[in-house]
Image (cartoon, rainbow, N blue to C red):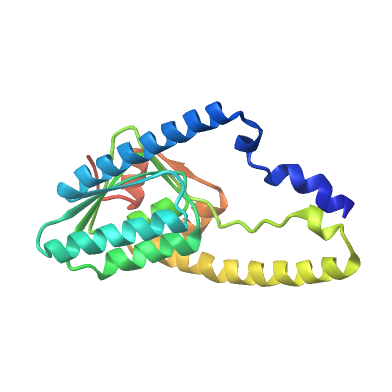
């Protein structure tokens, strides 16, 4: 009970401590931001353009999948342009986007804006044509598994349970890592072993370096 109480503050909504007028103002601003985002995305869709800006999570993957399916159904001949500016994100969500892009009849032109790190670089490999802006970068690194030690310290039984969960996560991650190596190497100008080395070293590539090793096709 003491442990749960000590962690309670971590899960409290910061808006709970605000006065009603401040809360209302915050909600109005958030509604305005959401409305502006919807207008922005709708405008891009009309031009057959989609953005992946920020961390790739389940919500973003679902949105991107719906949008590319909509554009593909609207016209299977016209290309779709996908702008990537992301530090990475979830492997499952990224692979889901990768798979759906590969299944489309429409060609997809991927454009790296600022950065396409980690799993964002994975999504890029699904695109028919892979472009990068002159001062943008791509960073490769191995997948990571994390676990919260605070829960491991509760009891010996919990410790054993968490160790088993962690072991399974490590095995699953190893399998997914091999998939990532295969995808990155499939269109690269270097060997799979070189790709693996880049990931182990958390290598960052400039636009020209990314083109030299085959992570992109051209500098936009």
User: Where residue 66 sits in the image (x, y, percent)?
Assistant: 30, 61
The quarter of the rendered structure image containing the N terminus is bottom right
User: Where residue 26 sits in the image (x, y, percent)?
Assistant: 49, 31
Q: Which residue sits at x=53%, y=27%? A: 21
**Is 16 or 36 nearer to us in this picture?**
16
**Is 29 or 103 nearer to us in this picture?**
29
User: Where residue 141 sits in the image (x, y, percent)?
Assistant: 52, 51
Q: Tell me if residue 190 comes above or below residue 54 in the rendering.
A: below
**Is 35 or 169 nearer to us in this picture?**
35
| Residue 190 seen in render | no
Q: Which residue sits at x=83%, y=67%? A: 158
Query: How many marks are shown on the rendered structure?
Result: 0
User: 154 left or right of 175?
Assistant: right
Q: Which residue sits at x=71%, y=43%? A: 10
The quarter of the rendered structure image containing the C terminus is top left
Single out the residue that lies furthest toward the front.
20
State the image quarter where residue 119 is shown: bottom left
Q: Tell me if residue 145 comes above or below residue 9 in the rendering.
A: below
User: 104 left or right of 8?
Assistant: left
| Residue 24 seen in render | yes
State the image quarter where residue 35 is shown: top left
User: 115 left or right of 17?
Assistant: left
User: Where residue 180 sits in the image (x, y, percent)?
Assistant: 46, 63
Q: Which residue sits at x=55%, y=71%? A: 175
């Amino acid at each position: 009970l003491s442990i749960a109480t000590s962690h309670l503050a971590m899960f409290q909504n910061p808006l709970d401590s605000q006065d009603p007028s401040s809360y209302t103002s915050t909600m109005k601003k958030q509604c305005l931001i959401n409305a502006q985002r919807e207008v922005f995305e709708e405008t891009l869709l009309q031009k057959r353009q989609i953005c992946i800006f920020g961390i790739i999570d389940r919500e973003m993957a679902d949105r991107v999948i719906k949008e590319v399916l909509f554009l593909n159904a609207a016209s299977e001949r016209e290309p779709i342009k996908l702008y990537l500016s992301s530090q990475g994100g979830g492997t499952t969500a990224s692979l889901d986007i990768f798979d759906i892009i590969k299944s489309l009849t429409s060609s997809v032109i991927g454009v790296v804006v600022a950065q396409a790190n980690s799993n964002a670089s994975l999504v890029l490999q699904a695109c028919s044509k892979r472009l990068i802006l002159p001062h943008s970068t791509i960073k490769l690194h191995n997948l990571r598994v994390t676990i919260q030690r605070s829960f491991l310290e509760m009891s010996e039984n919990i410790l054993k349970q968490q160790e088993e969960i962690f072991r399974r996560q490590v095995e699953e991650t190893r399998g997914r890592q091999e998939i990532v190596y295969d995808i990155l190497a499939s269109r690269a100008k270097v060997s799979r072993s070189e790709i693996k080395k880049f990931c182990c070293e958390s290598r960052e590539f400039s636009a020209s370096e990314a083109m030299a090793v085959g992570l992109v096709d051209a500098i936009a």
